């Protein structure tokens, strides 16, 4: 590990190991899906992100690997959005049901990621960092270059908006019942720093994505 000076402070600098990128593939794919609202576009986004990262040597200042990769993923997504100038198109119901053996879980995953993708950018990015990638609030705030208090507020608003959107979605009755059963106190990942307000469908989405 190299010692360096960055913005006047003594900060440890290290190089991102390209051989370890595969360790983060699953979580980055889920994050990409939450950005795009589409599995297919998520695959392209992750591929483009890896190509961008591998294009030159990457030095990390205080970031962990996942936080840094989240920032590159987000920047790549924003570049693609500016180029495309359109939102992802809805996925047909029959395609969602064909994603796995459990059609309801597949449909829940589609609904959750579409709901996250439709959030305002600040809430979407915060929810992707904390609830999809599993970063702590401190790690997420650092990755997104914002204050932890602001990020916490965005996560709370994002969770509430996703829960309301899912309850209002015109999806199969089984999905809506699963959302109601889960309630606002469904536990989130340990790394997120506490319980979440998202319904059970968010946890199902993680399993379907992998």
Image: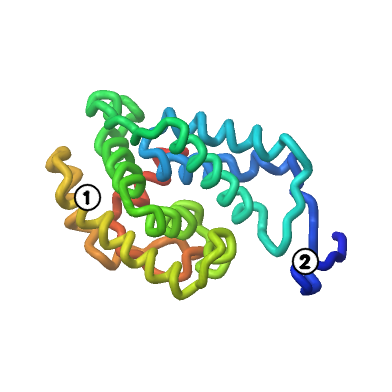
**Badge nearest the viewer, 1 or 2:** 2
Label at residue 183:
none
Q: Which residue is mark 2?
A: 6
Instruction: List the single residue furthest toward the right.
Output: 2
Residue indicated by mark 1: 166
Question: Based on the displayed image, in which of its 4 quarters is residue 163 positioned?
Answer: bottom left
Q: Counting other residues with Cα less than 10 Å from the Cα at mark 2, is it few (<14), some (14-19), or many (20 or more)?
A: few
Where 121 sits versus 49, above or below? below
- Quarter that holds the N terminus: bottom right
Q: Is residue 196 left or right of residue 26?
A: left
Q: Is residue 40 above or below residue 169?
A: above
Q: Is residue 142 left or right of residue 106?
A: right
Residue 49: percent from left, percent from top: 59, 37
Say left or right for 161 vs 41: left
Name the residue located 60 percent from the left edge and 45 percent from the top edge. 24
From the viewer's perspective, tell me whether residue 142 is left or right of residue 3: left
Nearest to N terminus: mark 1 or mark 2: 2
Helix, strand or loop for disc 2 = strand
- Image quarter for residue 182? bottom left
Q: Under tag 1, what secondary structure?
A: helix
Front residue (pair 155, 103): 155
Q: Residue at x 30, y 34 (%)?
A: 102
């Amino acid at each position: 590990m190299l010692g360096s000076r960055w913005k006047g402070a003594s900060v440890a600098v290290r190089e991102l190991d390209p051989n370890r990128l595969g360790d983060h593939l699953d979580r980055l794919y889920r994050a990409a899906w939450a950005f795009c609202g589409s599995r297919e576009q998520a695959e392209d986004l992750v591929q483009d992100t890896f190509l961008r990262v591998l294009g030159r040597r990457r030095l990390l200042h205080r970031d962990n690997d996942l936080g840094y990769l989240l920032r590159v993923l987000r920047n790549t997504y924003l570049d693609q959005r500016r180029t495309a100038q359109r939102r992802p198109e809805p996925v047909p119901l029959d395609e969602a049901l064909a994603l796995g053996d459990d059609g309801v879980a597949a449909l829940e995953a589609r609904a959750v990621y579409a709901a996250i993708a439709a959030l305002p950018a600040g809430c979407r990015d915060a929810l992707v960092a904390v609830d999809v990638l599993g970063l702590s609030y401190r790690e997420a705030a650092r990755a997104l270059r914002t204050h932890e208090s602001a990020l916490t507020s965005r996560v709370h608003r994002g969770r509430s908006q996703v829960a309301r959107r899912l309850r209002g979605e015109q999806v199969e009755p089984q999905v809506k019942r699963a959302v109601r059963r889960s309630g606002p106190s469904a536990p989130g990942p340990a790394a997120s720093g506490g319980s979440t307000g998202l319904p059970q469908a968010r946890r199902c989405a993680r399993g379907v994505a992998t």
